[in-house]
Amino acid sequence: MRVAVLGAGALGSLYGAWSAEAGHDVVLVGRQRHVDVIGRHGLQVGDRRGGSRTVAIGASALVESAADADVVLVASKAQDTAALLDAYRGEPRAAWSVQNGARQADPLVARFGAAAIGGTSMVGARLDRPGVVTNTFTGATYVGPLPTSDTAAATTVRLSLGHAVDVVERDDIVDVLWSKAVLAAGAMGLSVLLRLPYHHVFVEPGARNVFYDVVREAADVATAEGASLVDLPGPLQAGSLMSAGRGIALARLAEVGRHMVAAGQTSVRVSMLQSLESGRRMEVDAVFGDLVASADRHGLAVPLLRAVTDIVRTLDETVTA
């Protein structure tokens, strides 16, 4: 298949590499410096154990170069989605996203109709420099049909990624998206406020407490929107965490921190923190703003979530790049 990754930064480049290694014809659409290096030297893909490989893959700064794709993956920051989709003229068989936010599929549905499906990633990646990405941790990738989706689109996406990727098809993909969004509000918010690697969110008692309270407020929003929080494989499980009492939940979060330290996952920096540190705008509306707006529509009090949103937005407004 012909696969196009629109907005190929760290995560998009990694998924593109997996598709290329599965034998598909891939083009990464990204920033000029990134694609220039890939064009000369290939994409360098590393892992957290220090291994590295070179992947031969197409790359372009022009959205038009990907117009004949069978599968489109949107991996840009949420604030760049509208411009990318406006410039894209192709009609793929399947389109999906690994962006943050419970409603990240909405622009894809508006643009691609039945080809659009829901998708979310539990994979971590870091762009070390143009042309060089590192897979910081690997979890499952979830895809599934939306009410508007063609029945074959999710399977098409799974096939485009090959056997090296753990792709799970879920009929309850909307609940999966909300469950990740709820956890992301705490993970992204605390990571940005602390400006520390991700494990500190769970290792430090004060950070654990605030994380739980932010997630609790976000979970109330998800419930008001009609979503059911579900458990997904991995250390953080939204459904169980929110159904447990506070004491049990905090103990589980402490165990997450201990596990990350024991596994050597002490250099992971979430995507939003990477954006802040590199002078790029953050996905404030997709991760936080939408939750606060939904809370307002339902008359829910979310004081901590609102405070985190205001602080992160203030930090974001200082970014000039």
Image: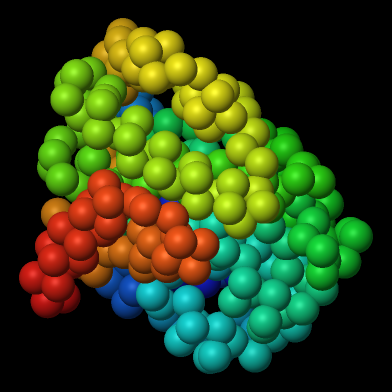
Quadrant the N terminus occupies: bottom right
Give the left or right position of residue 271, taking residue 177 as reference.
Answer: left
Give the left or right position of residue 167, taking residue 198 as reference.
Answer: right
Residue 312: % across, % down? 20, 58
Residue 100: % across, % down? 46, 56
Q: Is residue 288 above or below residue 133?
A: below
Could you say which quadrant of the image residue 229 lies in? top right
Quadrant the C terminus occupies: bottom left
Judge by depth and name the residue closer to the eye, 62 or 289.
289
Q: Is residue 286 above or below residue 32?
A: above
Could you say which quadrant of the image residue 293 lies in? bottom left
- In this rendering, does residue 48 appear at all? yes
- In this rendering, does residue 286 appear at all? no
Give the left or right position of residue 201, taking residue 140 as reference.
Answer: left
The residue that appears at 73% across and 69% down in the rendered structure is 116
Q: How is the image coloured?
A: rainbow
Q: Residue furthest left?
A: 318
- The count of marks equals 0
Q: Residue furthest front?
A: 299
The residue that appears at 37% across and 13% down in the rendered structure is 247
The residue that appears at 73% across and 62% down in the rendered structure is 117
Residue 33: % across, % down? 28, 71
The residue that appears at 71% across and 49% down in the rendered structure is 173
Give the left or right position of residue 290, taking residue 243 as reference.
Answer: left
Residue 246: % across, % down? 39, 19
Q: Is residue 191 above or below residue 93?
A: above
Judge by depth and name the residue closer to the eye, 258 or 205.
205
